[in-house]
Structures are given as C-alpha cells and as structure tokens.
Amino acid sequence: MTFYCVILIEMAKSNQCSTCQKPSGVMYCIGCDGYFCTKDFRGHREILFIEMEQLIEERNRLQEKINKATKPNNSSSPLIEEINAWEKITIEKVQQTAEHARQQANQLINSKSMKITIEFRGFSDELADLKETEDYIEHDLTRLKQKINQFNIQLTQLSQGNRLQLNRKESERINWNHILYVREKPVEVERQQTPAIIKESPQATKPLSQSELRCGGRACSQCGKCSDWYYDYNKKGYVRRDDCTCVRCLGDIYAAFRHICRCK
C-alpha cells in the first residue's frame, strides 16, 4: 500500500505532533490520520519504508517456498520420502520371499536328484552282477530296459521342473492399484493438523483455533465459533471431540447452529 502524505500548514495549537506532542504538527499523514513535525515526519516515513522492506523480504522468502513446493519431481517432499521408504521395504520383502522360494525349490530338486542317484547306483550294481554271472533271461533284459527309460523320464522331468509347481495364487490376488495410492486428507483432519494463524497485533500472533471462547472451547479459524464438536452421521447429531474442552450443553438444534462451527 502506498501512503500519500500532504503538507498542510495550520495553527500549531490545533495540530499537535503525534510523536513529540509539540504544537508544531505541520505535516499530515492521511494513512494514520496524524500530524507530525518536520523532524518526526521523516522518522514516521522511515518506519513505513522499513515495513515495506520487511514485506519485500517476506515476499521473497515466500517466493522461495513456492518455487520449492512447485518444483517438478520434488524428491525432498516428506510424502515422496515416505513412498521411497515403502518401496525399499516392499522390495526387500519381495526379495526375501523369492529367496525363500528358491531355497524350497533347491531342496526339492536336491532330494529328487539324490533319490535318482541312489536308485541308479542300485541299478548299475545289478546290471554289472548280471553281466558277470551271465545269469539273466529275456524278462530281465526287458525289465532293465524299462528301468533305463524310467531314469530318462525322471531326469527330463527333473531338468524341466515338470514335477514342481510354483504357487502364485496369493501374489496374484494383490491389487497393485490399491495397495498404495495418494489422496488428499479429509478437510476435518487437515484443519486439526494445520490450525490457521491470524495476526492479532503488530507485536504478537497466535492461532485462532487455540483461542478460548466463553464456553471453554476453541474457536474455529474461519468462523470463530466453537470447533470442539462435529456432526456424527450415525448418531444424527453433534457430538464432542475426544479433546473437547467446551462445557456448554447444546440443548435444541437451533442452539447448536448458533454455537457450533459448521465449516466444511
């Protein structure tokens, strides 16, 4: 805001300086509606200049915050950091689950391999014994050929994993579009977590939501009414919050409308 000051030369007695109280107020400020002597008028303007510089500095700091908040791919955002942490934990859990499944697969494969090895050793000893003694007939040769075919089938199944199956039913039920997503907080929750702060005086500030009313409750930052109550759609009426400090009894619904904050 630009303040315009005009010089009015009037009677010294009627135009007392607002700063030194001397009857020499020859300078008039339409911004504060006060008279000043020539010396104090310069000091008055200097105060306005300082306040303007402070506003410029506040504006510059605000611009930096806006630039940071609107920067694309803002990796320093707490929300992005939370997503990154979830991603890391989820990847670790997936890797642990996959490693556990690999160990199960290796154990089953090794047990199958060991069984085939033991059976093949017995087959080899029998075949060597029959060759040495020449005590075999057509039936023995047919049985041994069938045993070799059976070994080939078992080895093929073992190498291709046909006898083992990976159970993925539970993992396929995961809805990845809903397991993690981002949405805006409900207005009521956001209002509780971020109370609005208003400037009450040049010397001090305090959040309006913490201002106490006559009822002992806290004033809404928007309408100034008691914010210690909320409407419960299940009970179809206004109920106290868990941290309610309001001691007033609402009575009828009209009293509630006059007393309770209904901001959305």
Image (cartoon, rainbow, N blue to C red):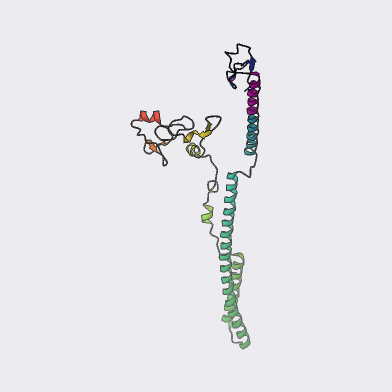
Residue 245 percent across, percent down from the top left:
40, 38
Q: Nearer the viewer, residue 25 or 127?
A: 25
- Residue at (53% x, 54% y) in the render: 171
Instruction: Confirm whether the magenta stretch covers residue 50.
Output: yes
Q: Nearer the viewer, residue 134 or 261?
A: 261
- Residue at (59% x, 78% y) in the render: 144
Q: Nearer the viewer, residue 186 or 176?
A: 186
| Residue 173 falls left or right of residue 54 | left
| 136 shown above or below 67 | below
Residue 74 percent across, percent down from the top left:
63, 42
Please report the bounds of the magenta region as a residue range: 30-52
Can I make out residue 142 in this image? no
Residue found at the far bottom of this picture = 133
| 28 shown above or below 115 | above
Residue found at the far left of this picture = 251
| 79 shown above or below 162 | above
Residue 188 percent across, percent down from the top left:
47, 37
- Residue at (56% x, 57% y) in the render: 93
Rendered image quadrant of residue 136: bottom right
- Residue at (53% x, 31% y) in the render: 198
| Quadrant for the N terminus in the image | top right
| Residue 217 falls left or right of residue 155 | left
Main SS of residues in magenta: helix
Say how many tags the image has: 0
Rendered image quadrant of residue 253: top left
Residue 173 percent across, percent down from the top left:
51, 52
Instruction: Confirm whether the magenta stretch covers residue 112.
Output: no
Can I make out residue 128 in this image? yes
